[in-house]
Image: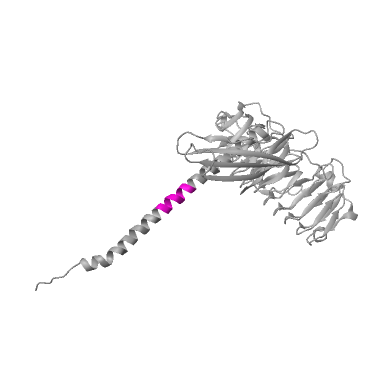
Amino acid sequence: MNQTGSVLLALIIMMPFFILIVASFMDLAVNNYSISKKDQYRTHAQLAADAGIDASMESINTIVDWPGSGSQKEVHAGDASVRTTYETVVSPVDDDTKKLSSTGRSFTPASNTTNPSSEITIEITLRAVGSGSFSIVTGVGGLYLSNSAKVLGGDVFVNGEINMQGNSQIGLTTNPVKLSVANQNCPLPSNPNFNAEYPRVCTAADGSPEPISISNPAWIYGDVTANNQTTNTRMSNNGLIGSSGITPKVLPEHDRGLQKSSILPANDRSGADASCTTNGGSKTWEANTKIIGNVEIDKDCTVTIKGDVWITGNFNMSNSKAKLKIDDSLDTTQPVVMVDGQVTKFSNGSTIIGNIKKTGAYIISYWTTASCYPDCSDVTGSELYNSRDQVAITMSQSSSGPETIFYSRWGKVLIENSGDIGALVGQTVELQNSGVITFGSSVGAGAVKFWLIDGYRRDI
């Protein structure tokens, strides 16, 4: 049977819908293109603002009281489609603080000089830091840096090895450091003379392993001398200048016996009594005090220390308002806080505050897995090898001690985030995670200053 009909009516009905669908897709495509172009212009402006920050940091650290670029500076004008510029302004806040504002602009076409397609302003805070002597001294373990960890002030001495990953950095182009590496981490446990000889400087018999390992994009700026090191990549200003001649350093001495014998029994107190954990609270630790048990400083509580203190248990500081303050009556001799417990931890922005003479504390942990713990006079062989990576002191979440020395006598100091630190000493020192860590005492009158980005950026 034959069937007849017409599709004309159906086409007449459906055609407007097809037109609407096509128009919608075209409108969507146009909008997506417009959005992508705006994102592209914004990216160009962001990169220009970052370039302005980088260029300004060099000028700030080489020209006294440099005020900023003064006008727009071209970053890119290589084609007719886009041109980018930056403009920076430096504003002093006080003697040790400045604000740097960097505005990046993108123009399209490149002939456009008045109406930017996108504009981004980044403001950062700069902090002045003075360069001291050694900011880090490590034992046979060495120095390990990862993520964006940076050592930007003071020289570095490493008895063991150095391993750098991520965006980690030692030194600045404007403030290079002196880095010495002894390569004292031989022989390996597989060597039959391991216990008798460990630690000693590696030799040809050990295969002369290079002590410095740097993964892209990490970098060292400074004079580098390292036993057995021949690879000089990812080093500059002046980079590797010597491959021998570094004599291992003995880590700083501390007379543990003398401090214990100087304890005044009348000052003995329990960990619970010495702890400070109430909002608005305060306590005082007298000189030559023995604290028996674990100690905690928390909440908005301040402990003032008047001299050497011996803590037989753990020492934990947490909370951004928790403070250990050095009494103003002390001179330039740092009070020693000797900790026997396995945990010495500073977290959540807790702070050790120096006195009016900029005297901080000397925090020393004696934690070790060695059988002689806690009264070891020396640790060698397999006991030192096993102990060197045991975390004894931890600083995290922007905790700080600008004038304080943190010393793990037989184990590791672990810095997990940014914070102002006087110096670090340990068999092993590890810096990880993001943020800039600055070393050295606060800048005083007449001190040489260099300026560092102080950990935040604000896009406005």
* Coloration of the structure image: one colour
Q: Is residue 342 visible?
A: no
The residue furthest right is 266
Q: Where is 413 relative to 64, above or below?
A: below
Q: Residue at x 85, y 52 (%)?
A: 289
Q: Nearer the viewer, residue 130 or 218?
A: 130
Q: Which residue is the extreme one toward the bottom?
A: 1
In terms of depth relative to the viewer, which is nearer, 121 or 175? Answer: 121
Magenta range: 30-38
Q: How many marks?
A: 0
Tell me where residue 395 appears, x and y as whole percent. 69, 49
Residue 394: percent from left, percent from top: 68, 50
Q: Residue furthest front?
A: 114
Instruction: Judge from the rendering whether residue 128 lies leftward or rightward of residue 227; answer left or right.
Output: right
Nearer the observer, 7 or 315 = 7
Which part of the image, by quadrant, shows the N terminus?
bottom left
The reply to whether the magenta stretch includes residue 260 is: no
Q: Residue at x 81, y 55 (%)?
A: 302
Q: Quadrant of residue 316?
A: bottom right
Membership of 32 in magenta stretch: yes
Measuring from the top left, give residue 285's x and y in whole percent. 85, 53
Name which quarter of the figure residue 50 lies in: top right
Quarter of the image where one finds residue 382:
top right
Q: At 24% across and 68% down in the image, what residue appears?
A: 10
157 or 371: nearer the viewer: 157
Q: Is residue 290 left or right of residue 235?
A: right
Q: Main secondary structure of the magenta part?
A: helix
- Horizontally, residue 90 falls left or right of residue 301, namely left
Q: Is residue 112 visible in the rendered structure shown here?
A: yes
Residue 402 horizontal/vertical position (percent): 75, 44
